[in-house]
Amino acid sequence: MLESLGNTDRTRVFAHYGLAGALTAALGSLAASIPGLLAPLGLDRLAAMQGMFVLYGLLGKAGRMLYARLPSRPPAPAIRKTAALGPSRKIVFKLFSRFRRSERLALTPPS
């Protein structure tokens, strides 16, 4: 999905994603205190934790339903394979042969 966005839009989407993650983490940290807050109201701490577990499961199901509504990704376009060296292949081999020849001359012992 991100391939269809421009650079500016992609940055904006990642910023929103990061913000949503940070806010969700903060809300989760705050939610951890709910069982302690419900204890003075007469609700057993274990029952409050079980209720939070059920709520966590429902939030997971809601997230799954939202994710299922996303449009399916179109197939990736076929990538044409190109030669590793391309048009410069001839030049590279020519330079390689010259350096190889000069290397052999440098390694031969003097007579």
Image (spheres, rainbow, N blue to C red):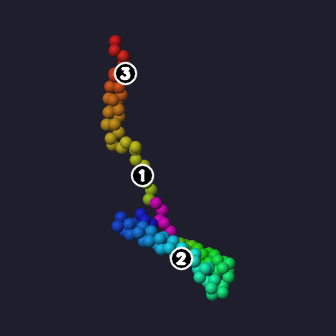
> Of residues 30 and 50, which is closer to you in this image?
30
Q: Horizontally, is 74 left or right of 58 in the view?
A: left
Q: Which mark is residue 7?
A: none
- Say whether disc 1 or disc 3 marks the residue closer to the N-terminus: 1
Q: Horizontally, is 101 left or right of 61 in the view?
A: left
- Say whether disc 2 or disc 3 marks the residue closer to the N-terminus: 2
**Residue with the most extreme top position:** 111
Magenta residues span: 69-76
The answer for how far apart the CA atoms under marks 2 and 3 are is 73 Å
- Residue for badge 3: 107
Task: Choose top left, top right, bottom left or bottom right for residue 68.
Answer: bottom right
Determine if residue 109 is in view.
Answer: yes
> Of residues 3 and 60, which is closer to you in this image?
60
Determine if residue 69 is in view.
Answer: no
Q: Is residue 59 above or below residue 85?
A: below
Task: Choose top left, top right, bottom left or bottom right for residue 55.
Answer: bottom right
- Residue for badge 1: 80
SS of the residue under disc 3: helix
Q: Which mark is residue 30?
A: 2
**The N terminus lies in quadrant:** bottom left
Structural crowding at the residue carrying mark 3, measured as other residues with C-alpha within 10 Å and reported as few (<14), some (14–19) or many (≥20) = few
Q: Horizontally, is 103 left or right of 71 in the view?
A: left
Would residue 54 be counted in the magenta stretch?
no
Instruction: Name the residue rendered at 43%, 54% in the picture.
Output: 79
Instruction: Name the residue rendered at 47%, 71% in the picture.
Output: 22
Q: How many marks?
A: 3
- Labelled pair 2, 3 in contact (Cβ < 8 Å): no
The majority secondary structure of the magenta stretch comes to: loop
Question: Residue 73 location in percent, x, y?
Answer: 48, 66
Q: Which three-letter amino acid code belongs to the residue tagged 3?
A: Leu
- Say whether disc 2 or disc 1 marks the residue closer to the N-terminus: 2
Q: Which of pointers 2 and 3 indicates the residue nearer the eye?
A: 2
